[in-house]
Amino acid sequence: MRRQMIFEAATYRPLTPREATVLSAAKKYEPVSDIANSLHIPQAIVVRHLSNIINKLNESDQQLARQIIYAYNLPTKD
């Protein structure tokens, strides 16, 4: 079975259904632990999804990327 991809309106690269769910929760600034508990996955996987989402955001979404990085204290690529 092929994985269904969801295009977030603000991105050109497709998000997986799980990434779309994590992004929706992240936009509400839900804690990583709450996101992980609601999806029944480890917190490390939530952080990995957040990192993947940030990497998929295009130039016009850098503000959202910075907000997510700041809110979740994620490492940045410098």
Image (cartoon, grey):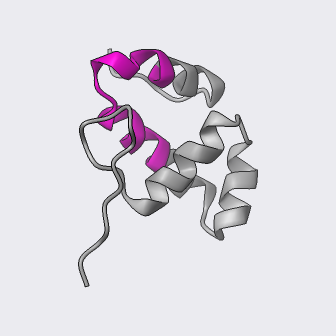
Against 59, residue 10 (above or below) is below
Report x, y in % for residue 53: 40, 40
Q: Magenta residues, as a range?
A: 48-65
As drawn, the residue found furthest toward the bottom would be: 1
Question: In this view of the protein, which residue sits in the foreground, 16 or 37?
Answer: 16
- Residue 4 point in image, percent of width and height: 31, 68
Residue depicted at 46% across the width and 49% down the height: 49
Give the residue displayed 32% in from the left and 34% down from the top: 11
Asked if 24 appears above or below 43 in the picture, the reply is above
Residue 60's quadrant in the figure? top left
Q: Quadrant of residue 26?
A: top right
Quadrant where the N terminus sits is bottom left
**Residue 64, magenta (yes or no):** yes
The vertical placement of 27 against 71, above or below, is below
**What residue is rendered at 39% in x and 17% in y?**
62
Magenta stretch, main secondary structure class: helix
Instruction: Tell me: 38 left or right of 44.
Output: right
> What is the number of callouts on the image?
0
Q: Position of residue 68 (x, y in %)?
A: 55, 28
The answer to whether residue 33 is left or right of residue 64 is right
Q: Residue at x 24, y 37 (%)?
A: 12
Left-right relation of 29 to 49: right
Quick one: which residue is furthest to the front in this view?
9
Q: Is residue 74 left or right of residue 26?
A: left
Q: Find residue 32 and report its horizontal and vertical position in percent.
A: 68, 46
- Whether 53 is among the magenta residues is yes
